[in-house]
Image: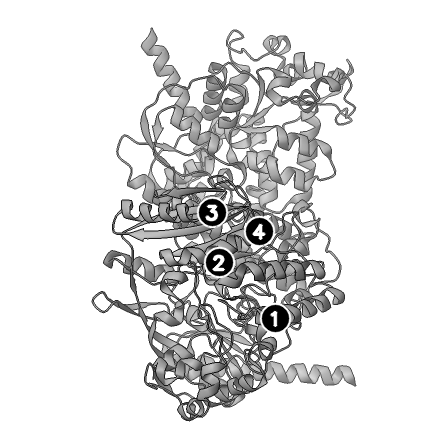
Amino acid sequence: MTDLRGRASRAGRATDLSGLEAELRRAVRGEVGFDVTSRALVTMDASNYRRVPLGVVAPADADDVAAVLEVCRARGVPVVARGGGTSIAGQATGTGVVLDFTRHMNGLISIDPDTRTAVVQPGLVLDRLQEAAAPHGLRFGPDPSTHSRCTLGGMIGNNSCGSHSVAWGTTADSVRELSVLTARGRRLRLGQDWAGAPEGLRELAEGELARLRTGFPELPRRISGYALDALLPEKGADVARSFCGSEGTLGILTEAVVRLVEAPRARALAVLGYGDESAAAEAAAGLLPLGPLTVEGMAADLVRSPAGLPKGGAWLFVETGGESAGEARARAEEIVRTADVVDAIVVTDPAAQRTLWRIREDASGTATRMADGSEAWPGWEDCAVPPVRLGAYLRDFRALLSAHGLRGTPYGHFGDGCIHVRIDFDLLTEAGVGRFRRFSEELADLVVAHGGSLSGEHGDGQARAELLPRMYGAETVRLFERAKALWDPDDLLNPGMLVRPAPLDTNLRFSALPAKPVDVAFGYPADGGDFRAAVRRCVGVAKCRTTTVTGPSVMCPSFRATGEEEHSTRGRARLLHEMLAGELITDGWRSTEVRDALDLCLSCKGCRSDCPVGVDMATYKAEFLHHHYAGRRRPAAHHSMGRLPEWLRWTARTHTAPLLNALASLRPLAAVGKRLAGIAPEREIPRLATRTFTAWWRGREPAQATGRGPAEAAGRGPAEAAGRGRVEAAGREPAEAAGRGPAEATGDLVVLWPDTFTEHLSPPVGQAAVRVLEAAGLRVTLPPTLLPRGGALGTGRPRPATALLTARRARVCCGLTYVSTGQLDRARTVLRRTLDLMEPVLRARVPVVVLEPSCAAALRTDLPELLPDDPRAAELSAAVLTFAEALERLAPHWTPPAVNRPVAGQTHCHQHAVLGDTPDRRLREAAGLTGELSGGCCGLAGNFGFEKGHFEVSKACAEDQLLPSVREAPEETLILADGFSCRTQLEQLAGVRGRHLAEVLAQALEKEAEESK
């Protein structure tokens, strides 16, 4: 009977949902999404909380907003306004209808430089306003670290601040007028002198003047509660200012007139080093009389690399402005002289300043991991106290952490007395959640004892609203409830926030996850082997939603191409979270919603480095595809391109490359072939090399093969050569190599990895690399190709004399194409065979040079994570060097030929994300190659851009940075592209030939040789 009632209840709810959706679709012109994906994407913001909405509406205009409110009011359905979804207290989540303002109501209506004002819609991203204001010498004052994706509506809802608040205040200080819709459909224009006040608000305020004058702490970052004191007559009875920070509980913002400030013509950044964060905090208030633009603080625990920072255990980032660079620098130097510091630097170069500021801005994500890699969470993210009390407060805060056995690293707006901190709460167990509550209650009391505010920037939401009586007292909180009732008598707007709040320890997003780990293929070493912990990495700071990229950043190319949340790293992580939760997405690994969201992930690995918390969506995608297609029919592209190494080796063995090239040149046949193989019809099939790189290697004259041993010179091939000499000797006495680096242990011998692309599609790259490596004094050989019938010896002993007689031919492979298509069982088989082949190389500790960045990245990361229990995997990973790394480490005294040409192109996304490009930069500089390579992803990304249905996104990714940089380059510019995919994309979309750095250097060597004759 109980089950029948439950089924009837669910059926009734489904009918109600269907009716609500249908009515909304009739009423609005914008999008209405009640599907699983739309709902799953907004279950969370950047907080600890999760709520499942009924549906999502992206209103086209204010009339749509009014229509939604009318429909929802009639049905008693709550409405929650949402911008960028970066709120940290849970106020951007709800159980009713979520209004997404980022799709349509995201415009800049006008800018008036004379009055220094702008008219904006709520979904406008802050950076877009800053870009439009900059030509007029203006800017919007508040600038949270999420400026590249947070919206003006969200900033007004939370009364956001940012790093420049010591100079330009909070968002409330920058608001002139607000256009608002109340829950009952009234359109109000809020401003000063009671403009737009709902009926009864003036009477309420005038009846509580004493409380409004004495019951609200005076400090620069008091964000908690409603700002009812802004209604005081001496403060201009400013209804718009009072509305700021109301977290969408009073009305729905549809338009805002905001004040702009004059931007300094020049800026300087003083970075001051202190012993610890308490010392930095105590010094911050003393710098305020000098008129800085920022006084930001952070400790060493939050810095991935201290490069560029002065000595110290904590730093203050103090920015100054002026009419000239000299004036700004003089002010910064005055601050350095005034401050009692361990060390300090003053930076005036804008690029160097941006690099330093990125360190501070990424702290919001970096702080979600402790120094030992354990998880840390928001919840007490932004308490604020009077700046002069910050040092004392931090000491008491540290003591309270210790008393509860917790850890956290403060950072933030020290000049305003506001700190951010993520704490290693255990939010997965009942005992841990209990401690979270007790700590929260005691910390609230501590903040109040120091005269502070529970929230200093991000609002109260669910995280702190329950504790507001401790800050304001019961009577003032009842005043908040009365104000809410005047604006929203039906409690329709964001219920459970600010007044009559949900308990702070309910609706926790972690409680929905399964209690036990799920079976996975990858090792996830940074997450304790737990896929749940890997998915939990995404805390919602949404750096992946940045629409414009400067510098070498990559993440997230598919979001920039589509603008859709489900194609951002955060969106995909949210869907994976809901897949594990099993409430919305009920079919687990078989989910079509998750599959479709991951379909446009390029596996560029940009998030692995650019995401502040190191989300690795490429790995998660491979994991999902592995489970999704287990025992099921795979797409044709998984067979045609996922198994590309097998097809190309078969082509080489049968010598059919000329025939296949001829067939591919016949358009009707090519079209049929592409359709059968799942290849995009817009793509041209790359031509296969008629002579592989290995065939070229074997055909070299013995005198030229400086790296070959006697066996190879006799025509026996690279396998025998790699098994002789120093390589084989190392197997006899492993202890000899102990404690030595690759160069020291092996002299000048290197193994050049014949990756699939170099071997079969671009042998000239491998040939060029051999010429350059040999010119640098290195001896080059290729990996072994003979595998004993019983597998590798695996003992570290000399190979028996009969081993080669019974061996079979095999080729090394990084497994990349299998990994990217989720064929992980096959990938492991291929990688184990590769390790068997490479055993003599690993025993000899010979460096392995890999020319294709994606293959090098696969060997560095995917290999040890897929085979975590095989020690050889870690050994091969550590042996891998890029082309530039090999020259820098193994031939440090070699001088490359002088090319003296400008370059353009793109740093390979895997190079940026996994390998690093510092050696490449130094090598280019040494060769006289000038200019910077762009960031982003080329969009081809291995098999991605060739798959049917991906062409338009692939092209859009290329147009983001790569193609514009090439088009804008001077005629004499060399186009560098170390990846085969990048070169193919350039050729097919721009008709431009990109070259590997090895090709450029080899050509310069040949030119030098000719000139010396």
The answer to whether residue 1006 is left or right of residue 885 is left
Q: Give me the C-alpha separation between circle 2 and circle 1.
A: 19 Å
Residue that carries the numbered disc 4 in the rendered image: 615
Mark 4 nearby-residue class (10 Å; few <14, some 14–19, many ≥20) = many
Q: Which of the labelled discs sits on residue 444, or is there none? A: 1
User: Is 739 positioned to the left or the right of 128 in the image?
Assistant: right
Distance between the Cα atoms at labels 3 and 1?
32 Å
- Mark sitting earlier along the chain (3/1): 3
Q: Residue at x 43, y 81 (%)?
A: 229
- Amino acid type, label 3: Asp
The label on residue 414 is: 2
Q: Is residue 607 depicted above or below 390 in this figure? A: above
| Residue that label 3 marks | 340
In front: mark 3 or mark 4?
Answer: 3
Q: Is the N terminus in the top left, top right, bottom left or bottom right quadrant?
A: bottom right
Badges 2 and 1: C-beta atoms under 8 Å apart?
Answer: no
> Could you give the CA–CA distance between mark 2 and mark 4, rounded to whole angstroms?
29 Å
Q: Earlier in the sequence, mark 2 or mark 3?
A: 3
Which of disc 4 and disc 3 is earlier in sequence?
3
Q: Secondary structure at mark 1?
A: helix
Give the label, 3 or 1, closer to the camera. 3
Residue drawn at point x = 30 percent, y = 63 percent? 261
Residue 682 seen by the camera: no
